[in-house]
Image: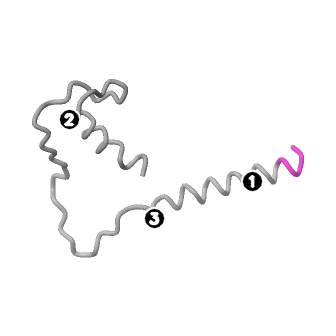
Amino acid sequence: MKPQTRMHFTLSLLTAGILCASTATWAANVPAGTQLADKQELVRNNGSEPASLDPHKVESDVEFNIISDLFDGLVS
């Protein structure tokens, strides 16, 4: 392996490691002594059951609201 290639690989691996290690800092900060609920759930009153949760098949506001909540953490 050439020295430049080895250095590039090492720097890439180091950068990926630092990025992975820093993801823990993105979690929510919960103050000490805060009592969290035993059952963590989100209740959304949509009025009816969704026909599908497939993003390509969403046709109504009911389904869109649920899809929006599901993917909110992934895209923001």
In magenta stretch: residue 37? no
Horizontal side, residue 72 vs residue 40: left or right: right
- Count residues near mark 3 (Cα–Cα under 10 Å), then give few for <14, some for 14-19, many for 20+: few
The residue pinned by badge 2 equals: 62
Residue type at mark 2 is Val
Disc nearer the start of the sequence (3/1):
1
User: At numbered mark 1, what does the secondary structure look like: helix, strand or loop?
Assistant: helix
Which label lies toward us, 3 or 2? 2
x and y, in percent, of residue 76 in the image: 42, 52
Cα distance between the residues tagged 3 and 2? 34 Å
The residue pinned by badge 3 equals: 25
User: At numbered mark 2, what does the secondary structure look like: helix, strand or loop?
Assistant: helix
Which label lies toward us, 3 or 1? 3
The residue pinned by badge 1 equals: 10
Which label lies toward us, 1 or 2? 2
Q: Quadrant of residue 69?
A: top left
Q: Quadrant of residue 30?
A: bottom left
